[in-house]
Image (tube, rainbow, N blue to C red):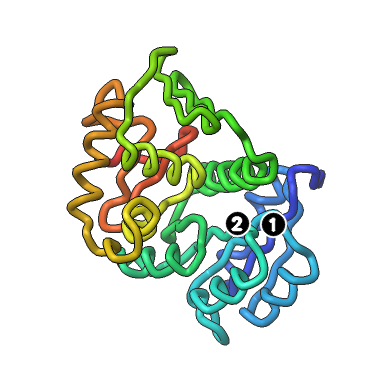
Amino acid sequence: MPDEKGQILLIEDEPQMRRFLRVIIQGHGYKLVEAVTGEEGLKEAAVRNPDIILLDLGLPDIDGLIITQRIREWSEIPIIVISAREQEMDKVKALDAGADDYLTKPFGAGELLARIRVAMRHKAMKKTGQAVFVVDNLKVDFPKRRVFLDGKDVHLTPIEYKLLVVLIQNAGKVVTHRQLLKEAWGPPYENQTQYLRVYMTQLRHKLEADPARPKFLINEPGVGYRFKVENEQETPRT
């Protein structure tokens, strides 16, 4: 199989899930490396420096949260958690530990591939350090700190702009409430979710054609927000 699309490290101990993912990943042109334990996964990550890591949380030797934290000590490789743990707190813990995204088993091939494309694009964007971000009818000029919708200037307050920048810098990723509050207001406000709700509502009214059905600023209930950059085959969340 061609592997010009990139290399993916899969850290997963369940044989059936590995077979399922192997067919999808290799069938779409990615090179796949597999590890069945946390220790093996850490070694492969260090040796191969893959483009993306798909990580199961429930491994036999090391919890996936610890693996995420250890990888984040030395690398910014995008990590997509794939787990049967459905609780919102598990998602929040994984994202706060440094994961880029979270998929709950079972999931479809289309959704997985969309998340992989988003992670690849985000990695490329960080590498190139884009000065201007454009998606659909929205344009953000970072050096000038200006936002345009359909070519017209949109006035954002400093907090609104800061929230938008954090979400765009992590485009396609879920950014937790705590992360957004810390970036926009500072560490003392990490638990003030009502602030965030108010400002995100204001931001939607300024940037979304239909704030009740947003296409950019997607709510991940109980977890955080995601700046959506492509059709991820999800039900719209409001």
- Please state which of the two labelled residues, at mark 2 or mark 1, is closer to the viewer: 2
**Amino acid type for the residue under numbered disc 1:** Ile
Q: Position of residue 144 (x, y in %)?
A: 51, 28
Query: Taking the image as drawn, is residue 15 in sight?
Result: no
Residue at screen point 60% across, 56% down: 78
Q: Quadrant of residue 74?
A: bottom right
Which is nearer the eye, 42 or 170? 170
Residue bearing the label numbered 1: 8
23 above or below 94? above
State the residue in front, 232 or 140: 140
Are dots 2 and 1 in contact, CB under 8 Å?
A: no
The residue closer to the viewer here, 183 or 84, is 183
Give coordinates of residue 167: x percent, y percent. Answer: 43, 44
Which residue does the numbered mark 2 point to in the structure image? 78
Q: Quadrant of residue 72?
A: bottom right
Report the number of numbered marks: 2
Q: Which residue is at a point 42% across and 51% down the rendered structure image?
A: 174
Pick whichever of labels 2 and 1 is earlier in the sequence.
1
Image coordinates of residue 222 in percent, x first then y, are 26, 57
Q: What's the amino acid at mark 2?
A: Pro
Is residue 127 placed above or below 41 in the rendered structure? above
Dot 2: element: loop
Rendered residue at 70%/54% (across/down): 51
Q: Is residue 125 left or right of residue 150?
A: right
46 horizontally vs 82: left or right: right
* Residue located farthest toward the bottom when viewing the structure as drawn: 61
Drawn side of residue 152 relative to residue 7, left or right: left
